[in-house]
Amino acid sequence: MTSRGPAGGRGPPRIALRRLRSNRPALAALGLFVAIVVFVLAAPLWAREVAETGPNATHTVEKIEVDGERRDVVTPDGTPIGPVWLGAGGKFFLGADGRLGRDEMVRLMYGGRTSLLIGITAALLTTVLAVVLGLVAGYYRGWRDSVISRSLDVIWAFPVVLLGIALGTALAVGGLELGPISISSGSIWIPILIIGFVYTPYMARPIRGEVLALREREFVEAAVARGAGPLGVMFGELLPNLWSTIIVFFTLAVANNMLLEAALSFLGAGVQPPSSSWGTMVSSGFELIYSAPLLAIAPGVLILLTVLALNVFGDGLRDALDPRSKVRLQFEAHTGTYEPEEEVA
Amino acid sequence: MAPFVVRRLAGMIAVLFAISVIVFLIFNVIPNSDPAQRMAGKNATPQLIANITEEWGFDEPLPEQYLKTMELIFTGELVSYSSRLDVDEEIRKGLPATASLCIGAAVIWMFFGILFGYLSAMRAGRLTDRVLTALALAGISMPVFLLASVFLYYLTFRVELFPSSGYVPLTENPLDWAYHLILPWTTLAVLFVGFYSRVLRSNMLEAMNEDYVRTARAKGLDERRVMTRHVLRNSLIPIVTLFGLDFAAVIGGGAIITESIFSLGGVGQYAADSISNLDLPPIMAVTLFGAFFVVLFNTVVDIVYAYLDPRIRLEGGRQ
């Protein structure tokens, strides 16, 4: 083994990795998250090989053979078949989703793809926006900081769900055309943009605070003395020191994004038909809450498990990357509480 | 004190103005279609669209449009073109139910949040702490509608323990009022119980290392006193700050899902129903009033804070 650094010490990433490896709940959470990702990635395979149907294929008047007995997928009075598990060779494993008689299991797997895709893409968007805004505001200070900080304050003043609903409903009718960007009203890019935008202040503010502190350190002075320009300092010196914050925040942001996506979709201001996500599935499942409770509960449980896994893993990451961290980066999905941290003078 | 209040109020007015501009932009400018058509909703006849264009000034320059829009909202003349109902009137009717839900839930979440956080910190690392921490994590990861659907199915349908919907005014029958609200209160509170207990636990663990705690022990106070009088009391300050923010946000729009699931007939349900009909005028009004309420409430909290704690007004405000 080659020695790293003075006296063969280990670099910070390796120390963090070792700490993470001894944190069993965090590892279990990571395992759960990976399992969920595999579950949704396997959607086409399950649909083709086991269920032999697609997520949007309807089976309204069909009958299937369950343990040798022929049963309606949807009874004449409109009740969908319940879970038949492996009784029909994997078809309608979790039953049908309602009057249309679509395969609930297949829909869950495909719906999860939308939910995860939105959660992750929106978190990427938030991260990029927040890092750029935080770097510019914290590095330049002065009027740039004032403009950015005050703008973020205004967005922050809105309750998260409310701002999401306002944007979601307004754009659900018209679609979006902003300069070169043109998005039609049913696109899942609309919830992605909305969620990414709504959470930006919650990440940009702590990053700005951290940049304000970092820019006073000697290594920044050294870089300036070497002749590094503003961009060189921001992206070459400051950004590498923000990674641990960014990684932790990103993980927690995916969790929060998924909750917000579900909330917006549940209300009809998020993912629009014909696309479906776990949120839209809960919403349509609620119509049959007393006759087929599984339809609302199953996607809800999957959201809970995914979000829980990400929250536990994110906590573990934070402990591993900076065990003395006093900055509590908690933000919370339903109302968007952000715990104000101490401002760096 | 006076300069602080003036400064804070000036800041508040600026934020309120910015919020109203953003709401205006979101509903009338950013989306890519005829705003009159969007506002008209489902039964958009050419005549109605022409009327709306005239009334909202959609053929005039943007500043004019902004003024006309605000005039409609704040003079109470805004109507939903789908339901033909007066929007401000509907919002006013929903307020008692929304306030009942939010205040009750807030009492529950503060009580259990502090209780669980305290127990967790006292037994840090032991079984009680682990169980409570796991529950808290589940609480903050819980989608509101999952808890609501489990409650609805098991507690109102399988076992008919609670009513599944409806709101009974407090003045009519206080017992029935509470009985109808128990499930909604619990649903709304669980998330915050998890969140607050976690924050309180870590605050308390941090406070336990402070010098004043050592001093308190050194002067011979018994452990219980040290914990409640010194550690807990000081750890509650950030919780109170958080509470101000959360409570405003919940009233201002955080309870929409809970309200609509349990059909409480409050402002949130009105908003939810409007969303499913894509009826924009009520959503616009609820968004604006919700955000305004959050800002006003936070300003009041800030001023009260500054009155109680002189350090804040000298340093220029909480944040």
Image: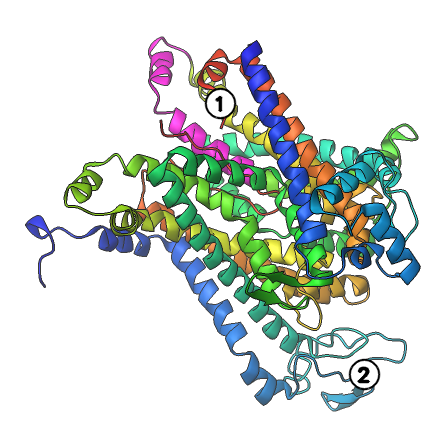
Position of A157 relative to B11 (above/below): below
Secondary structure beneath disc 1?
Answer: helix
Q: Residue at x 53, y 60 (%)?
A: A119
Q: Residue at x 42, y 61 (%)?
A: A30
Is residue B160 toward the left or the right of residue B224 in the image?
A: right
Q: Nearer the viewer, mark 2 or mark 1?
A: 2
User: Which residue does the numbered mark 2 point to in the structure image?
Assistant: A60
Residue B318's x, y, as percent? 50, 24
Residue A162: image x %, image y %? 67, 46
| Chain at tag 2 | A
Magenta span contains residue B211: yes
Under mark 1, the amino acid is Leu
Residue located farthest toward the left when viewing the structure as drawn: A7
Side of A63 where A313 appears, left or right: left
* Near-viewer residue (B256 or A192): A192
Q: Position of residue B8 (x, y in %)?
A: 57, 21
Residue B232, disc:
1
Whether residue A147 appears in this view of the structure is yes
Are labels 2 and 1 on one chain?
no
The quarter of the rendered structure image containing the N terminus of chain B is top right
Q: Secondary structure at mark 2?
A: loop
- The answer to whether residue B147 shows anywhere in this view is no
Rendered image: mark on residue B140:
none
Residue A82 is a magenta residue: no
Q: Start and end of the magenta stretch?
A: B194-221
